């Protein structure tokens, strides 16, 4: 009988990374099944196929670090450790949601775990994250700030303005570009002759790195290294993480066979599936068995069931909530 590997920190980390990706995948697959019922009161931008970025990034950041995301934020929210029930309740527009049903899928927030906010406005969190990093440096705080955005956000002037400021002030900020190759329906090559996003800000003195965002272990190691360098007073960095978007830009359907997609893209995306790649590592390197993975999936499925039940049972916000939380208390 093959002896099962003993516990090791490396094995434990690999399992945590895989579990986080699987939790995102199963939660979003449940959203796909619920969405046609109209119970979800919000547009949804799914990150199925992109889970390696959220898991690797969030587990590499320290608990006190700050994170800003886009409207495709379910993965960041869950990977950061925020409550899944509150996320589903938010999608349902319920009072028990993370923004009391006012923000929906595109505006998830969980500051208690460092997710300072997600925004539906393309590129809008880049200057906010830069300002947060300025506050950290001014107040001599030790946290690092990460701004996550898509490849379409580098078309915005505020990207270059923010990067220029961060480099000048040597701010502790990581700019993370989730490059799934499409700004809605527009390829990077349709918009730019220079298609390597990591090179876009090199003229401003920003360091740029391109990595495989579907390799969750590579994402984790890269972010861990760059965050540690920033804590030692290093310069800000842009990490371009290439990945694949399996679903349509917005909604639960798939557009992978549409005219603007490259021929054969579906098969290439599936071969790069971050979960399948991580499974292979778990089995070959750490001796994780099929039964182990099945048990993990059953456990997470039960968690998703509970989160959906919580959202279903939660009340809608009453009229008294309309003006609540509009102003911060003194």
Image: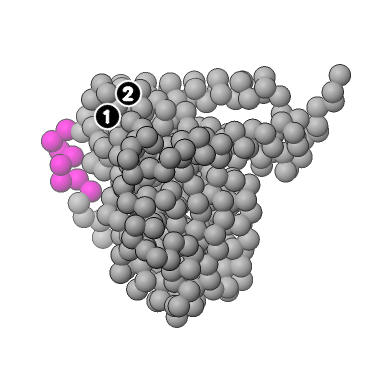
* Rendering quarter of residue 105: top left
Residue 5 x, y percent position in the rendering: 80, 32
Which element carries disc 1, helix, strand or loop?
A: loop
Asked whether the viewer can see residue 296, the reply is yes
Residue 188: percent from the left, percent from the top? 38, 56
The tag on residue 34 is 2
Residue positioned 55% across, 40% down in the render:
272
> At 45% from the left edge and 78% from the top edge, which residue is drawn?
203
Q: Is residue 21 or residue 200 the one in the foreground?
A: 200
Q: Is residue 122 above or below residue 312?
A: below
The reply to whether the C-beta atoms of the residues labelled 1 and 2 are less than 8 Å apart is yes
Left or right: 61 as drawn, with respect to 283: left
Q: Quick check: 127 left or right of 286?
A: left
Residue at the (61%, 71%) spot, across then down: 232
Q: Secondary structure at mark 2?
A: helix
The first of marks 1 and 2 along the sequence is 2
Looking at the picture, how far across and down is residue 325, in whole percent?
23, 48
Name the residue located 32 percent from the left edge and 40 percent from the top edge. 259
Which residue has dot 1 on it? 40
- The segment highlighted magenta reads 318-325
Q: Quadrant of the C terminus?
A: bottom left
Outermost residue on the left side: it is 319
- Looking at the rendered image, the quarter that the N terminus falls into is top right
Can residue 137 be seen here? The reply is: no
Depth check, front residue: 212 or 10: 212
Magenta stretch holds residue 245: no
How far across and how far down the image is residue 106, in percent? Answer: 30, 44
- Number of the label disc, if any, that sits on residue 83: none
The relative height of residue 191 versus residue 110 in the rendered view (above or below) is below
How crowded pointer 1 is (Cα within 10 Å; few <14, some 14-19, many 20+) is rated as many
The quadrant holding residue 305 is: top left
Q: Residue furthest front?
A: 263
């Amino acid at each position: 009988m093959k002896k099962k590997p003993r516990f090791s920190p490396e094995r434990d980390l690999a399992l945590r990374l895989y579990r986080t990706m699987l939790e995102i995948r199963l939660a979003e697959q449940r959203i796909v099944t619920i969405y046609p019922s109209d119970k979800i009161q919000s547009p949804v931008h799914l990150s199925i196929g992109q889970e390696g970025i959220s898991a690797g990034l969030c587990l590499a950041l320290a608990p006190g670090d700050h994170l800003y995301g886009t409207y495709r934020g379910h993965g960041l929210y869950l990977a950061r450790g925020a409550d899944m029930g509150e996320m589903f309740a938010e999608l349902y527009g319920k009072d028990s949601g993370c923004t009391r049903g006012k923000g929906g899928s595109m505006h998830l927030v969980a500051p208690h775990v460092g997710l300072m906010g997600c925004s539906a406005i393309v590129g809008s969190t880049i200057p906010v994250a830069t300002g947060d990093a300025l506050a950290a440096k001014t107040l001599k705080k030790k946290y690092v700030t990460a701004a996550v955005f898509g490849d379409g956000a580098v078309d915005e002037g505020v990207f270059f303005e923010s990067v220029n400021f961060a480099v000048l002030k040597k701010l502790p900020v990581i700019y993370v570009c989730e490059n799934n190759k499409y700004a809605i329906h527009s390829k990077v090559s349709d918009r730019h002759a220079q298609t390597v996003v990591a090179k876009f800000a090199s003229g401003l003195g920003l360091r740029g790195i391109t990595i495989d965002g579907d390799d969750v272990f590579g994402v984790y190691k890269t972010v861990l290294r760059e965050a540690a360098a920033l804590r030692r007073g290093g310069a800000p960095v842009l990490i371009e993480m290439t990945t694949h978007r399996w679903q349509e830009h917005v909604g639960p359907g798939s557009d992978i066979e549409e005219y603007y997609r490259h021929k054969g893209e579906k098969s290439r995306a599936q071969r790069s599936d971050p979960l399948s790649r991580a499974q292979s590592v778990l089995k070959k390197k750490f001796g994780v068995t099929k039964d182990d993975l099945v048990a993990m999936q059953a456990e997470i499925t039960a968690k998703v069931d509970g989160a959906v039940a919580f959202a279903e049972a939660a009340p809608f916000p009453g009229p008294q909530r309309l003006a609540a939380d509009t102003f911060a208390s003194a």
